[in-house]
Amino acid sequence: MELFVTKDSVVRKIWGKGDTILFIFAGASAEFALNKAVDWLYFTGKLPADPLGRLFSTVSYARLIVFANKEDANKAIDKMSAIHSAVEKSRGTIIPNWAYQDVLYMLIYYSISAFELLERKLTDSEKEEVFNVFYRVGIRMGIKDLPSNYKEWLPLREEHLQTNLQLSNFSVDLYKQYKKNLGLIRFFLLREGQKLVVPERVNELLKLGKLSLLTPILPVYKLSRIIKLDWFLKSAVLPSEYKAQIKDLDVVPA
């Protein structure tokens, strides 16, 4: 049966490691807060009420798509489209096409950024692989005016960063919810992690600062993965009630 993402694809390596996923969502949580369409996340109330639960829910969808056969992946994408359509119907208006593009562009950008932070630089062909997977997701969802390759995507990504981001009352409130749900220490670690993966525009708007205190710790963490102590460190970063989900982050589906 045809797979949605081939077994030897770097995308499987990226989405098969929990720490990479955590950095993907550290970056996405920062950029989500700034997006001009963030009010859609507040309409359902799910993200501000339980940002960590929302993270793990999103991970399960992404995992299903990346590691599934083509038929099952398309079913998962169609289900996501149906969920969004239901929200649009409930609100009586349409999520703008550029907002869908932004989410897709975030997944491309932070997949690359997080992997390069923790592993190695990706080749141009590997970056094209990452782009292609999410491009196919976007096409299936009916997102319009997508670039056809990674090279075309780069200037559009920059344009979206400059045009579609702003610091709003929603941004401020969402960060308050992050702090409330994570606690002071974990919220501090989130912000330090965000500094390592977000683009300059996001850092500038959120005033995160240039230097991260996690930078000197990263080599130690990479060593901990070799000697299998990284699960303990991830458990320390995330609340105990998410222990099962933390373990599942490193379980790569067959």
Image (cartoon, rainbow, N blue to C red):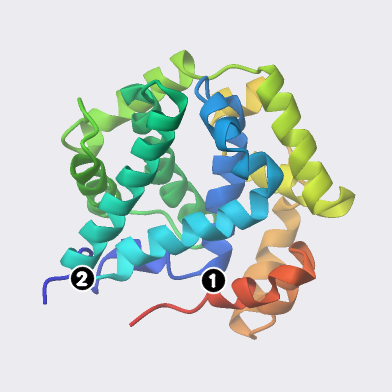
For the residues bearing labels 1 and 2, Cβ distance under 8 angstroms = no
Q: Residues within 10 Å of mark 1 (few under 14, many from 20)?
A: many
Q: Quadrant of residue 167?
A: top right
* Label 2 element class: loop
Mark 1 or 2 closer to N-term? 2
Query: Residue at position x 35%, y 66% from top?
Result: 64
Query: Residue at position x 79%, y 35% from top?
Result: 176
Q: Quadrant of residue 225?
A: bottom right
Q: Is residue 120 above or below residue 26?
A: below
Along the horizontal axis of the image, is 247 left or right of 252? right
Q: Residues within 10 Å of mark 2 (few under 14, many from 20)?
A: some
Query: Residue at position x 24%, y 74% from top?
Result: 7
Looking at numbered disc 1 in the image, what kind of residue is underneath it?
Leu
Q: Nearer the viewer, residue 198 or 235?
A: 235
Q: Position of residue 58 (x, y in %)?
A: 48, 54
* Label 1 element class: loop
Q: Position of residue 163 (x, y in %)?
A: 45, 13
Q: Position of residue 143 (x, y in %)?
A: 24, 33
Residue indicated by mark 2: 69
Q: Quadrant of residue 254?
A: bottom left
Query: How far apart in space, not on screen, are marks 1 and 2 (Cα)?
Result: 20 Å
Q: Which mark is residue 46?
A: none
**Which residue is at the far bottom?**
227
Q: Is residue 153 visible?
A: yes
Looking at numbered disc 2 in the image, what kind of residue is underneath it?
Asn
Q: Nearer the viewer, residue 253 or 97?
A: 97
**Which residue is at the far right?**
184
Residue indicated by mark 1: 249
Query: Residue at position x 74%, y 78% from top?
Result: 232
Q: Nearer the viewer, residue 90 or 112?
A: 90
